[in-house]
């Protein structure tokens, strides 16, 4: 979930900032925020046609705007966390990580926490000055931030608390809304795996000011909870080079460890998925019609089954709902909206805004904002 960017503050100082990059359908971007997780990709495209506002939270910068600090990281005890699902453990060769201490069901809420600090993407002072101000407000007894791991800091700077703090942010910060990144002390212990090998997805909920992590797949007791730090619909070598340069580790996840012929087949599937996503989005410019778009979505879905790559399915189904709505195909709308409810439920939570939105589509399809904006057309049965 990461991407390194050079950011320049108003004093002209340059700082390299790395932040994690969760799964996205886009080719470059990141930030699987609650809002980004919905229909961001296709809406960006559709905006040309149906005047939607494009919402792309994917670009990972750390521009600086001003000081903002959220209440310290609190793991919400009000939900499933009464029955803790994992523990933090020391894992050989990978620092700490989260290990399931019981079987976990697909879609279960694993973590709900506030940031220990939340940083605007843009500030008007130097990053270290900024961090020094914000960290001075942390109670001395709150060691959660300083306990986090960091990489890429030369040993001679390890005694410098501000350089350490900057490295901690770079190693652990994730998207916390369109204009912010945040450090979440429990979620930050999640290690990475690629494509079909990660089993947990995080998303930011702006309205609640919390980050939630859900189980994308069922996880057995003793297994490690793993998320993805990048868009892993890329070739193995590209993913591994990226992870090494940004996070200083060689990925040996189940997908990266496949024997050569299986690895080549996996690369092929992932690249095809990425390319199909682009073709799918071209419906927004009228390059393909609704039926073709739905066919492509089905092809993506089937490749995801073959690869075990299940992330982003709520968004994909939600995008097809949009296509079906534009072509006034109520039956397809309902079918895809039901699918979106299910997969948004796993990835973002049954109580997410996206699930509510899709439930609304199921009950009142003609109220959809995209309704009837294209030629009437049956886009085909869901067949998934
Ligand atoms: C956000 S931290 C994850 C938690 C970290 N392991 C810890 O001890 O706090 C990111 C760092 O964890 C390590 N890491 C994450 N995923 C890994 C993996 N699959 N294999 C080895 N190390 C990994 C790398 O050092 C990476 O820079």
Image: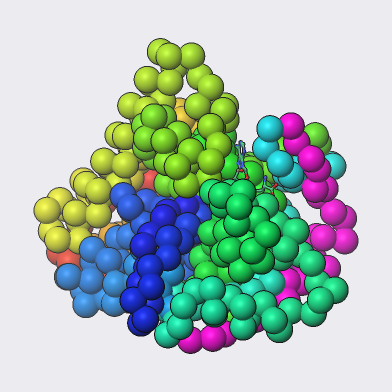
Give the farthest residue toward the left.
287
Query: Residue 327 vs residue 330: left or right?
Result: left
- Along the line of sight, the residue nearer the viewer: 364 or 172: 172
Residue 262, placed above or below residue 185? above
The residue closer to the viewer here, 55 or 371, is: 55
Q: Is residue 16 magenta?
A: no
Residue 257 screen position, x and y as percent: 53, 22
252 vs 122, nearest the viewer: 122
Q: Horizontal placement of 85 versus 382: left or right?
A: right
Residue pictured at 60% horizontal, 52% vertical: 156
Q: Tell me which residue sits at (25%, 54%) in the image.
A: 281
Q: Position of residue 252 (x, y in %)?
A: 56, 28
Residue occupying the point 14% across, 61% down: 285
From the image, which quarter does the C terminus lie in? top left
Between 35 and 138, which is closer to the camera in this rendering? 138
Picture mark count: 0
> What is the magenta segment's predominant secondary structure?
loop
Q: Is residue 339 visible?
A: no
Tell me the residue at 43%/69% (across/down): 62
Q: Tell me if residue 67 is in the magenta stretch.
A: yes
Residue 162 drawn above or below residue 22: below
Percent across and percent down for residue 269 are 36, 29
Is residue 104 toward the left or the right of residue 156 in the image? right
First to last magenta residue range: 66-92
């Amino acid at each position: 979930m990461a991407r390194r960017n050079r950011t320049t503050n108003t004093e002209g100082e340059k700082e390299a900032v790395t932040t994690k990059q969760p799964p996205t359908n886009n080719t470059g971007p990141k930030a699987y925020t609650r809002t980004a997780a919905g229909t961001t990709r296709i809406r960006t495209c559709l905006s040309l046609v149906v005047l939607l506002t494009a919402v792309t939270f994917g670009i990972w910068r750390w521009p600086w705007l001003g000081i903002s600090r959220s209440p310290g990281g609190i793991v919400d005890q009000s939900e499933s966390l009464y029955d803790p699902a994992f523990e933090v453990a020391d894992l050989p060769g990978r620092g700490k990580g989260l290990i399931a201490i019981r079987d976990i069901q697909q879609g279960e809420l694993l973590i709900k926490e506030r940031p220990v600090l939340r940083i605007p993407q843009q500030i008007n002072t130097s990053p270290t000055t900024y961090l020094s101000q914000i960290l001075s407000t942390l109670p001395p007894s709150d060691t959660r931030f300083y306990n986090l791991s960091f990489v890429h800091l030369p040993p001679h700077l390890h005694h410098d608390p501000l350089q350490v703090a900057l490295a901690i942010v770079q190693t652990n910060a994730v998207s916390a809304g369109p204009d912010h990144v945040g450090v979440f002390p429990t979620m930050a212990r999640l290690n990475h795996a690629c494509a079909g090998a990660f089993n947990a997805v995080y998303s930011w909920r702006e309205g609640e000011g919390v980050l939630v992590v859900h189980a994308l797949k069922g996880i057995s007791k003793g297994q490690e909870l793993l998320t993805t730090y990048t868009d892993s619909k890329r070739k193995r070598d590209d993913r591994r080079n990226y992870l090494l340069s940004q996070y200083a580790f060689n990925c040996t996840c189940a997908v990266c460890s496949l024997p050569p012929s299986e690895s080549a087949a996996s690369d092929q599937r992932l690249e095809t998925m990425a390319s199909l996503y682009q073709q799918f989005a071209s419906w927004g410019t009228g390059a393909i019609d609704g039926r073709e778009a739905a066919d492509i979505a089905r092809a993506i879905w089937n490749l995801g089954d073959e690869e075990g790559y299940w992330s982003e399915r709520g968004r994909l189904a939600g995008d097809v709902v949009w296509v079906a709505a534009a072509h006034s195909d109520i039956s397809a709308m309902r079918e895809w909206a039901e699918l979106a409810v299910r997969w948004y439920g796993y990835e973002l939570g049954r109580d997410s805004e996206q699930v509510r939105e899709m439930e609304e589509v199921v009950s009142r399809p003609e109220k959809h904002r995209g309704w009837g904006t294209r030629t009437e057309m049956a886009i085909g049965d869901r067949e998934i």
